[in-house]
Image (spheres, rainbow, N blue to C red):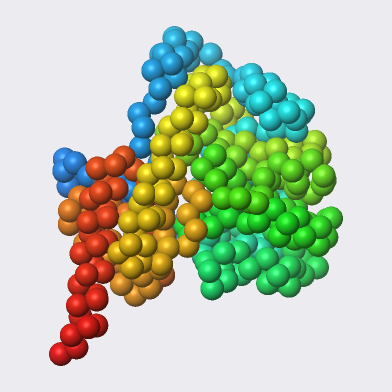
Amino acid sequence: MSKNSHTKVSPQGHPEETMTQRSGEPVPRAPLAGIPAYVPGRPADLDPDQPAFMLSSNENPFPPLPSVMHALAKASSSINRYPDFSAGGLRTVLAAELDVAAEDIAAGGGSVGVLQQIIRAYAGLGDEVIFAWRSFEAYPVLVQESGARPVKVPLNGADEHDLEAMLDAITPVTKIIMVCLPNNPTGPSIRHDQLKDFVSRVPPNILIVLDEAYREFVTGPDLANAMDFYRDRDNVAVLRTFSKAFGLAGLRVGYVVARRTVIDAVRKTGAPFAVNSLAEVGAIASLKAHGELLQRVRSVVAERTRVASALAAQGWTVPDPQGNFVWLGLGDASSEFAGACAAVGVIVRPFAGEGVRVSIGAPPANDAFLLVASEWNHRRVESTTWPV
Ligand SMILES: *Cc1c(COP(=O)(O)O)cnc(C)c1O
């Protein structure tokens, strides 16, 4: 708006107010001040030309399937066109795959993008959102951005969700309660009977978000399948992604399955055309190659078993890994351990003062990590066995 029209709108003027507006700078909404700046998975000071084993972001170590790359190349000839507004093609394929109505699915820019839509739709200033901690780093950021208060419920001694404590944390202003299964970054999932009991005790006016980003890697017996709860309840939303098992992290596509009313609300808070045309085509091509991709998932799981056994043999205690990563609860030594890994070109994810998350990669990457882990424990054993 021009200076002129501004004067016309307020002919009497409020000189002081006008002065403040003209001398200040744009100020973001207050809740944003509490959000820390983004921390990238790869240390900034790392030589970009030095080949490194990237075990810091839980990515799929396999390159994209030829069939997926072919579909993307073909689709790139029409990127002058807008994509389908609601990713209708992808939702139709997913609906058949999951045996749900296409109206019960909303797709978005990664499942983090979808989660942002969910939180914006259901929580704001004065509200509370409960989640376990430590869990996925995006949770507190997205909750704070909405203006709601993040309520972090500590994990139990086995680095699992403390579902009883989460239920105890519910207040009249709780709007969303999130569960990450399996939990990133610690690894354990939740038994079906435990989740069933939990879901039945959450009041029906609170949205339960079940984040299943690592669903395909789960192998443990009796573990929960979030879709079972969506079928029984109106207040359950299941989050899934193509970033991990499907290896499309760079394309940014994920989705939520929930009742129609939830989907309608979530659509309203999304960026228009959030799923771009290549992301939609890549996701559909990946679903067509499901069998081939699950074969790859099985080999990651086999490596996970090998890594976890090797760590146990070295004397480490590792919480049950049900995703494509392992957790070392190194406490105060976490950053130092990550540094020891980086020194040999293995990039892992330290959480200062808590632990280190190491993604399962290709065998040579895992071997390089296991070597550092072995030397680390050896050193520790020596220093405790031979006090000076
Ligand atoms: C990786 C991850 C996601 C997926 O993020 P995208 O935005 O789909 O790439 C969601 N939740 C958790 C817990 C994750 O670890």
Between 226 and 235, the one lying in front of the other is 226
Residue 163 percent across, percent down from the top left: 68, 66
Q: On the rendered image, what quadrant is the C terminus found in?
A: bottom left
Residue 383 percent across, percent down from the top left: 20, 80
Q: On the rendered image, what quadrant is the N terminus found in?
A: top right
Q: With 287 as the anchor, is 120 left or right in this view? A: right
Q: Is residue 365 above or below residue 179?
A: above
Q: With 28 as the anchor, is 201 left or right in this view? A: right
Please report the residue visible at 70 percent of the width from the left and 26 percent of the height from the top.
Answer: 95
Q: With 321 as the anchor, is 269 left or right in this view? A: right
Residue 207 percent across, percent down from the top left: 75, 53
Q: With 99 as the anchor, is 15 left or right in this view? A: left
Residue ranking furthest to the bottom: 388
Please report the residue visible at 63 percent of the width from the left and 56 percent of the height from the top.
Answer: 190
Q: Is residue 109 above or below residue 211?
A: above
Please report the residue visible at 53 percent of the width from the left and 13 percent of the height from the top.
Answer: 81
Residue 28 percent across, percent down from the top left: 53, 56
Q: In this view, does 130 lie above or below 111?
A: below
Between 126 and 323, the one lying in front of the other is 323
The answer to which quarter of the image holds residue 77 is: top left
Please report the residue visible at 56 percent of the width from the left and 69 percent of the height from the top.
Answer: 155
The answer to which quarter of the image holds residue 39 is: bottom left
**Residue 26 in view of the camera:** no
* Count of all numbered marks drawn on residues in the image: 0
